[in-house]
Amino acid sequence: MSWSDRRRALTGLAAGLAALALAAGCGFQPAYAPGGAGERLEGRVKADDPTNRDGFLLVEAIERRLGVPRNPRYRLSYSLSISSSGLGINSSASTTRYHLVGKLDYTLHDAVTGETLDSGEVESFTGYSTTSTSIADDAAETDARERLITILADKLVARLLTAPL
């Protein structure tokens, strides 16, 4: 190993240690570390029962991230809405691209007292293209809705992990 390689390695190590020190000094704590927010929420958030397919996909995505509630300490109520609008139009005036916008309003309650602990909304969007066959169009729309719900669940869980509980 040449002198310049050692120097570069030591410089990288020093920069990494400095970044760690800065992160620790600002109160940074990894969400999934022992004692972190991820551990505090794991298996303890019970989402309201879904009433439709989109709600089922949302609850399933939340449970994939936070675990199936075994001993729920928190109850999550939510309202999910997805709207669709045409974006691309071809020369025969047929819509060839759709834009889906999803909005998820949520409230996290204490499961025992019912007290509201956190609330808010997350939004996102996705899109899909259409073809000349209705089966392919339906599959593309279904896939886009599933992707959108996954994005909304990810954003929701990120908010819950940083909520002051």
Image (cartoon, rainbow, N blue to C red):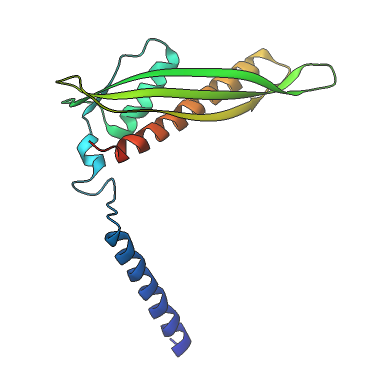
Q: Measuring from the top left, give residue 81's x and y in whole percent.
A: 48, 17
Query: In front here: 78 or 164?
Result: 164
Q: Measuring from the top left, give residue 148's x and y in whole percent.
A: 50, 27
Q: Measuring from the top left, give residue 124's x and y in whole percent.
A: 51, 30
- Quadrant position of residue 128: top right
- Image quadrant where one finds the N terminus: bottom left
Residue appearing at x 30%, y 39% in the figure: 161
- Image quadrant where one finds the C terminus: top left
Residue appearing at x 30%, y 58% in the figure: 26
Q: Residue furthest bottom?
A: 3
Q: Residue furthest right?
A: 91
Q: Residue furthest top?
A: 51
Q: Is residue 155 above or below residue 144?
A: below
Q: Is residue 33 above or below residue 154?
A: below
Residue appearing at x 41%, y 34% in the figure: 155
Q: Is residue 5 visible?
A: yes
Q: Measuring from the top left, give residue 88's x and y in whole percent.
A: 74, 25
- Quadrant position of residue 140: top right
Q: Is residue 2 visible?
A: no
Query: In front here: 69 or 75?
Result: 75
Position of residue 90 in the picture relative to residue 108 (left or right):
right
Q: How many marks?
A: 0
Query: In front here: 26 or 37?
Result: 26
- Quadrant position of residue 127: top right
